[in-house]
Image (spheres, grey):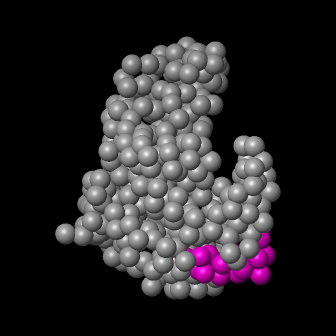
């Protein structure tokens, strides 16, 4: 039997939404799915057993950060990420490309690779496609990303074309360097906000698509309407026999709209980042618990949620935790937000299975009152 394969269970009759199953060596993933981000081989403030309780199916870890600390060789010596972080379900690692371009104090991008200074201590490093694959092989995730160049929002056509073409050249090198059959390599579609570049990128990427395909370079500062427009243009061009992964997208409305446009997998740090500042995602919209309105509100964050935080604590208590700087506040809201997004994706999947996704989306916006737009 193949180690990795995807099967479509149901295609929505009115939209691009679909429900499927991605089979991996560390378990099956029901799609569409949301992946919590464990940047440093941990989801900030959320223990692995709590992630299991939240019904998380797959985690994302960051290649750049783990290469910097503690080092991919050390992770390999520990038995790979699954053992290192005590997570026996699927893991995906990004290529580190986005962080090299966005976090490095200085970087110089050439066709052979990227020279950059560490954001930690300024030390000089070089990563090329072969090195990126070597790092990801050492980390040992189930799904790994090809090394790509993400052009920033606002880049002109010529700059975007150079980055897209370089990504294709690097993809070929990644493909030739990758030899581990226990890891599925996903290529990444680039092209900024230019639909013709996106179409070329996707077409030229198809020969390398074995187990899945990723769409990068969106949700990088552009208005959501522009992102949706680019995604609309890509929908008819996708392969149908593999999962499609939209990188770095995780607000509830973008999950709904991404699924509408044929996306199966999502990730984002948003859920835990805003939680540490006291913002919860709920079935009725955003709740900013640090606000004074919740000082004497003894109701749970979300009466439709069964996470530990909602079953045990009130908004007033969580507000107190956040405002006095106690870790528990951010931990509990992080757990809630991840649980909420996982439930949202299950509800979306069930709606697709019942061929009622459009009605579900309409009800979602009605209940959340535009809170996430």
Residue 141: x percent and y percent?
42, 55
Identity of the residue drawn at 29% across and 69% down: 5
Q: Looking at the rendering, in which quadrant would you find the N terminus?
A: bottom left
Residue 329 part of the magenta-drawn span: no
Identity of the residue drawn at 56% across and 47% down: 71
Is residue 13 positioned above or below 276 on the image? below
Prevailing secondary structure of the magenta residues: helix
Is residue 248 positioned above or below 190 on the image? above
| Left/right of residue 151 with respect to residue 15 in the rendered view | right
Residue 144: x percent and y percent?
46, 62
Q: Quadrant of residue 189?
A: bottom right
| Left/right of residue 153 with respect to residue 342 in the rendered view | right
Q: Nearer the viewer, residue 236 or 265?
A: 265
Can residue 364 be seen at all in this image of the molecule?
no
Q: Quadrant of residue 114?
A: bottom right
Q: Nearer the viewer, residue 285 or 117?
A: 117
| Left/right of residue 153 with respect to residue 366 in the rendered view | right
Residue 162 part of the magenta-drawn span: yes
Q: Nearer the viewer, residue 329 or 92?
A: 92
Residue 110: x percent and y percent?
74, 73
Q: Residue furthest left?
A: 1
Q: Nearer the viewer, residue 304 or 182?
A: 182
Identity of the residue drawn at 42% across and 25% down: 309
Identity of the residue drawn at 47% across and 19% down: 314
Q: Which residues are magenta?
A: 152-171
Report the number of numbered marks.
Answer: 0
Can residue 334 be seen at all in this image of the molecule?
yes
Residue 165: x percent and y percent?
65, 81
Is residue 234 positioned above or below 53 on the image? below
């Amino acid at each position: 039997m193949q180690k990795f394969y995807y099967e479509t269970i149901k295609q929505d009759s009115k939209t691009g939404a679909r429900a499927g199953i991605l089979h991996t060596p560390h378990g099956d993933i029901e799609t569409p799915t949301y992946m919590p981000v464990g940047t440093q081989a941990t989801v900030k403030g959320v223990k692995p057993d709590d992630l299991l309780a939240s019904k998380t199916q797959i985690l994302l870890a960051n290649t750049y950060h783990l290469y910097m600390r503690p080092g991919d060789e050390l992770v390999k010596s520990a038995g790979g990420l699954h053992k290192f972080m005590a997570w026996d379900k699927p893991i995906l690692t990004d290529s580190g490309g986005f962080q090299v371009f966005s976090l490095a104090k200085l970087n110089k991008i050439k066709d052979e690779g990227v020279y950059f200074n560490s954001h930690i201590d300024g030390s000089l490093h070089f990563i090329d496609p072969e090195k990126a694959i070597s790092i990801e092989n050492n980390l040992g995730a189930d799904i790994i990303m090809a090394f790509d160049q993400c052009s920033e929002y606002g880049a002109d056509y010529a700059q975007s074309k150079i980055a897209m073409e370089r990504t294709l050249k690097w993809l070929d090198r990644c493909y030739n360097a990758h030899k581990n059959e226990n890891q599925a390599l996903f290529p990444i579609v680039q092209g900024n906000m230019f639909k013709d570049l996106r179409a070329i990128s996707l077409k030229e990427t198809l020969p390398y698509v074995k187990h899945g395909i990723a769409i990068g370079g969106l949700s990088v500062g552009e208005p959501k309407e522009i992102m949706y427009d680019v995604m609309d243009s890509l929908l008819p061009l996708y392969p149908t026999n593999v999962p499609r992964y939209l990188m770095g997208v995780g607000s509830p409305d973008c999950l709904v709209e991404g699924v509408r446009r044929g996306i199966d997998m999502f990730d984002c740090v948003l859920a835990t980042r805003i939680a540490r500042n006291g913002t919860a995602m709920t079935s009725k919209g955003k709740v900013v618990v640090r606000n004074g309105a919740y000082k004497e509100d003894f109701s749970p964050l979300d009466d439709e949620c069964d996470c530990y935080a909602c079953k045990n604590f009130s908004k007033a208590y969580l507000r107190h935790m956040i405002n006095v700087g106690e870790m528990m506040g951010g931990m509990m809201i992080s757990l809630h937000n991840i649980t909420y997004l996982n439930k949202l994706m299950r509800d979306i999947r069930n709606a697709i299975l019942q061929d009622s996704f459009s009605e579900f989306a309409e009800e979602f916006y009605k209940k959340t009152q535009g809170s996430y737009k």
